[in-house]
């Protein structure tokens, strides 16, 4: 078997195995689902009491970690300091409790290009799936039998391939995983032909790719109907929500989550987001106010990941509410009773494909598995010209640079030219933010042509 085919075969096996034995492990799934379902009918007081009961074992596990031992005998949540991402990144092993008989390792580049090495317990893995399954049920579909087409950041076809198929089948033929990097005006007929043949119940997408698909459909005059759309991993702009409903005629559920598994929120209509009760203990710290709007930072504590029990973790993400929310209203938001209007997210962390016609999302993955990168910034000067700016740790080596380059070439393969620059600082916007991806004006024009509505940062 050739290397490419072997990798594909292994990918499909991992996908099926993960669905059956990891994400829906029968030892955990039923119990966790019943607990989270029961919370939907609970009052604020009942939700707080249940959350406190879950926090006890989590805080006990956290006290056993090297980090917890440095904190001291912190019995209550308020006794713990706020945990910044830099502390976790610098010493992830300090947050391992050894509490689980089985753990799964994960790596994420994060929305800021800061690599994180994570460990998840079986309960944490299953809880995430229970939440996602509920969202599929909100789309009036059974998550165990639904036919799901995936248009996210999965690398399922060599990016350099210029002819179909641009997809693979998995989960016994119930999942069609499409290569988002290949979607363009010229390949749209192939994508539509396969999607119509597959007849998906749900389209699971990156919001950027949903926007690209809808704009391509609108320009071409082609018609595609999908009953439901599940969007996640990026901010779903209200105008894209409206566009998708008009073009695809679908119901939409948008969700927000983190690889650290310390917060989960969802929305079934624009401007009305809810935290998922029972997923995590949420605190909302005041960040800024501007007229009628106020912003709060999401601080989360896991309720399920005893293997890596992150306590009072500062996500760096913000929610928006109306100005004047009191303590009671903020509690109702944190416990999933009252909605909030928006989550500050990153909607344009994509690359223009080397041929200048397609879009590649999920570029924060470029930092995955690279140990000595403090932070990454990606600058795309042209479709085939990319610079990786690296804030490097002292031990950054040629091996780290090689790994970074291999990851980048999966998103922008030859003939794209990719250079790595070690820098002392990264570019900031006028608002003081450090974007993960910066596009030149020419690339911005090409992204608009590809269907991405480039917005002001």
Image: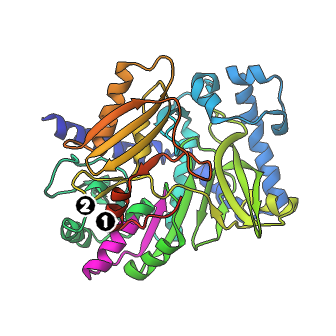
Q: Work out whether residue 224 can be spotted.
A: no
128 vs 316, nearest the viewer: 316
| Residue position for label 1 | 450
Sequence order check, earlier mark of 2 and 1: 2
**Residue 256's quadrant in the figure?**
bottom right
- Identify the magenta region: 210-232
Q: Is residue 227 magenta?
A: yes
Q: Secondary structure at mark 1?
A: loop
Q: Work out whether residue 336 can be spotted.
A: yes
Q: Quadrant of the N terminus?
A: top left
Colouring scheme applied when the structure was drawn: rainbow
Q: Secondary structure at mark 2?
A: loop
| Residue position for label 2 | 357
Q: Is residue 266 left or right of residue 247?
A: right
**Residue 87 drawn at (x, y percent):** 64, 28
Q: Are marks 2 and 1 in contact (CB under 8 Å)?
A: yes
Q: Quadrant of the C terminus?
A: bottom right
**Residue 248 drawn at (x, y percent):** 38, 78
423 vs 148, nearest the viewer: 423
Relative to residue 1, is residue 227 depicted above or below? below
């Amino acid at each position: 078997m050739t290397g490419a085919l072997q990798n594909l075969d292994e990918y499909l096996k991992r996908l099926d195995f993960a669905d059956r034995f990891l994400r829906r492990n029968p030892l955990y799934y039923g119990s966790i689902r019943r607990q989270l379902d029961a919370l939907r009918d609970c009052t604020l007081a009942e939700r707080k009491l249940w959350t406190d009961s879950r926090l006890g074992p989590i805080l006990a596990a956290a006290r056993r970690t090297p980090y917890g031992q440095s904190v001291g005998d912190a019995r209550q949540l308020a006794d713990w300091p706020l945990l910044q991402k830099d502390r976790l990144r610098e010493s992830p092993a300090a947050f391992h409790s050894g509490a689980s008989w089985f753990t799964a390792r994960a790596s994420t580049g994060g929305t800021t290009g800061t690599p994180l090495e994570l460990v998840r317990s079986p309960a944490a893995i299953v809880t995430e799936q229970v939440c996602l399954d509920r969202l599929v049920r909100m789309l009036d579909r059974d998550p165990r039998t639904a036919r799901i087409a995936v248009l996210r950041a999965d690398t399922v076809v060599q990016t350099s391939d210029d002819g179909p198929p641009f997809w693979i089948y998995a989960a016994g033929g119930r999942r069609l995983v499409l290569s988002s990097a290949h979607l363009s005006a010229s390949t749209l007929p192939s994508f539509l032909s396969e999607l119509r043949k597959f007849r998906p119940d749900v389209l699971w997408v990156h919001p950027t790719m949903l926007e690209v698909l809808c704009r391509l459909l609108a320009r071409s005059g082609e018609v595609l109907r999908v009953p439901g759309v599940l969007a996640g991993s990026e901010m779903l702009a209200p105008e894209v929500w409206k566009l998708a409903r008009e073009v695809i005629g679908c119901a939409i559920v948008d969700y927000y989550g983190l690889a650290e598994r310390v917060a989960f929120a969802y929305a079934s209509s624009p401007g009305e987001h809810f935290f998922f009760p029972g997923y995590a203990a949420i605190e909302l710290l005041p960040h800024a106010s501007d007229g009628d709007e106020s912003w709060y930072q999401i601080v989360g504590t896991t309720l399920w990941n005893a293997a890596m029990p992150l306590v009072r973790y500062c996500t760096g993400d913000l929610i928006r509410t109306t100005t004047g929310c009191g303590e009671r209203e903020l509690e109702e938001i944190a416990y999933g009773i009252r909605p909030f209007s928006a989550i500050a997210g990153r909607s344009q962390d994509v690359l223009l494909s080397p041929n200048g016609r397609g879009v590649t999302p999920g570029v924060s993955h470029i930092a995955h598995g690279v140990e000595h990168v403090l932070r990454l910034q990606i600058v795309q000067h042209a479709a085939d010209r990319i610079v990786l700016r690296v804030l490097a740790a002292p031990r950054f080596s040629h091996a780290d640079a090689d790994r970074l380059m291999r990851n980048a070439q999966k998103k922008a393969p030859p003939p794209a030219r990719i250079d790595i620059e070690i820098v002392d600082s990264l570019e900031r916007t006028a608002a003081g933010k450090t974007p993960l991806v910066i596009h030149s004006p020419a690339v911005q024009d090409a992204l608009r042509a590809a269907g991405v509505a480039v917005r002001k940062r």
